[in-house]
Amino acid sequence: MKIEEIYGYSNAEETHIAYLALMIYFYDAYEEVFLKNCFVKVEYENISFIKFDESLISSNIPVFNNFIISNLSNSSYGVICTFDSDNSIINRFGLTFGDKAIILINLNSIIRRGGLPVGNSLSGEFIINNSSKIQYNFTVKNDLDNRVIKLL
């Protein structure tokens, strides 16, 4: 599994990243991974671990304008399925070979300042079955020219 891209969605003033979207690609042909066994670690000033919420899943909907974003908390992440040939993500909450999904995270509720301030860095991990880890890190540029910004 790998994180292909990371996007952020800023607050209206474009001073903080309020939401994160981790674009993941699953290419392990041997084992199905269930989202209930995957956690996201977010590191900024402190460490937060968030888990999958089965009520916050859909397929092929707008990334930052949907019911998932409006229901995310500081302890849960949501998923948008973008490619799922065997319907494993939607039907069983499992990732199988070739699946692509977007992990949505509410930084606004995790970071008490109202999200990740521009010019700051954030790191973390997507943890699979408490064993495999995919690390991510990025720095937000100082001046945002759009509410949606590519971070990685």
Image (spheres, rainbow, N blue to C red):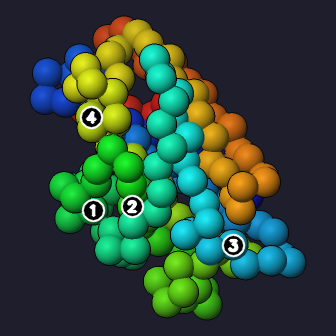
Disc 3/disc 4 C-alpha distance (Å): 28 Å
**106 shown above or below 130:** above
Which numbered tag is attached to residue 68?
1
Cα distance between the residues tagged 2 and 4: 14 Å
Q: Earlier in the sequence, mark 2 or mark 4?
A: 2
Q: Which residue is mark 2?
A: 78
Q: Earlier in the sequence, mark 1 or mark 2?
A: 1
The disc labelled 3 sits on which kind of residue?
A: Val
Q: CA distance from mark 1 to mark 4?
A: 14 Å
Residue beneath label 4, please? Answer: 108
Counting from the top left corner in percent of width and height, residue 87 is at: 54, 88
* Callout 2: SS: strand
* SS state under label 4: helix
- The answer to which of marks 1 and 4 sits earlier in the sequence is 1
Residue 4 falls left or right of residue 21: right
- Using the image, tell me which numbered label, if any, was put on residue 33: 3
- Look at label 1 and name its amino acid: Ile
Residue at position x 41%, y 10% from top?
119
Find out whether the residues at labels 1 and 2 contact each other: C-beta distance under 8 Å. yes
